[in-house]
Amino acid sequence: MHGKSVLLIIGGGIAAYKSLELIRRLAELGVTCGAILTRAGAEFVTPLSVSALTGQKVFQDLFSLTDESEMGHIELSRAADLVVVAPATADLMGKLAGGLANDLASTTLLATDKKILMVPAMNVRMWESPSVRRSFEILKKDGVLFAGPNDGEMACGEFGPGRMAEPLEIVAAIEAALGGAKSLASPLAGVRALVTAGPTREPVDPVRFLANHSSGKQGYAIAEALVRAGAETTLISGPVSIAPPDGVKLMRVTTAREMLAACEASLPADVLVMAAAVADWRPDIAANSKIKKSTDRVVPLIKLVENPDILATLAHHAKRPRLVIGFAAETDDVVENAIAKRARKGADWIIANDVSANLNGESVMGGERNRVHLISAAGREDWPEMSKRDVGTRLAARIAAEIKGAA
Ligand code: C5P
């Protein structure tokens, strides 16, 4: 991606604010971004904020003498490696599908000799209207690439398809378009992924167990992102209270030993993401009936024995997945411990996070946000704080780049 350039056309939709975030994400990856802001787009984000983020002049008007003399629309349409329309409104889609060119954005789209990636964003009824369906079909036939739209709640309060893809999903689509990947919407099509999530519960007796505070949110978000990227995804989950993402094959387990058995039964797989907080120890004997309080107040002693290390077992397995990713939930020396853990367990990557951190007033365990480091043979990457959903999306994009790059 480094050194590439994108021409971003920002259409008029409430999702335009996400395009500002997209520019920042692209800049982090060394991608330069020029921008065209449509008249309606300028109602949602200002030219000043766009140019402050791109570091370049924003083009707005086909008939502006200064715009045309600085860079004519034909030149503008050819200068970048890829043209991205985000948000792509019904209007911009309709104009390109119908060959209309009455402003700078539509004229540039007709004039370009580069690939076009559209990121639609509109109300669900608009998205489902026969004319937008027609535009969509025509544009796909003409070779226009698409990212999203996603299902979800919209700014207008309705629910359904039409929500603009998240910035990191758009980055993944741009990465795929620039890298020439065949299927943009499904960079992981044909890839088998195995994800573990949640805690394990180790029984003491029929009513008591040892467990931990893992909510399963990060592992579920990763499984969801892998499904969105087209991977055939098995999610092996300890006991959690959240709903499984659509499209996964869900296997529910309770103990570490059950989790290991479910993982082994799910091999072969191309990618393993061990996000579960597996209990390191279990009571050596789980009593068959409830341990009673004794009248002489003698406290029972519970002897612990070590659980199998699932990650290490699968990393050294005859059917080892091509990419083995472990997690390191640490409270001290996060990166140093993760580097040592990567070697000790035989994992390719370790995603390390500080579970003692307080992000937005919430703890990482059970909260919605995370700040992680990706430790690989190439070194460390420090990812900024983001939602667990975004960590999932970005990880799926990295997995796609790794797997497809090696293919
Ligand atoms: O050794 P530690 O528990 O810190 O390592 C964390 C990583 O190892 C996580 O990916 C976790 O899912 C995995 N693990 C495992 N089996 C265990 C303990 C941890 O697979 N018994």
Image: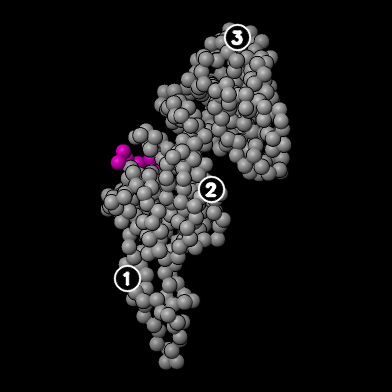
Q: Which residue is mark 1?
A: 305
Residue 388, can we see it?
no
Q: Picture coordinates of residue 62 (x, y %)? A: 65, 12
- Looking at the rendering, the stretch of residues picked out in magenta corresponds to 377-382
Q: Quadrant of the N terminus?
A: top left
Report if the beta carbon of the residue with label 2 is closer than 8 angstroms to ligand 1: no
Residue for point 40% across, 63% down = 258
Q: How many residues crowd around disc 2 within 10 Å: few (fewer than 14), some, or many (20 or more)?
A: some
Q: Nearer the viewer, residue 385 or 146?
A: 146
Of labels 1 and 3, earlier in sequence is: 3
Mark closer to the chain start, 2 or 3: 3
- For image coordinates 52% across by 21% down, the residue present is 115
Mark 1 is on which residue type? Val
The image quarter in which residue 116 lies: top right
Secondary structure of residue under mark 3 = helix
Q: Which mark is nearer the camera, 1 or 2?
A: 2
Q: Is residue 13 magenta?
A: no
Q: For mark 2, what is the residue? A: 247
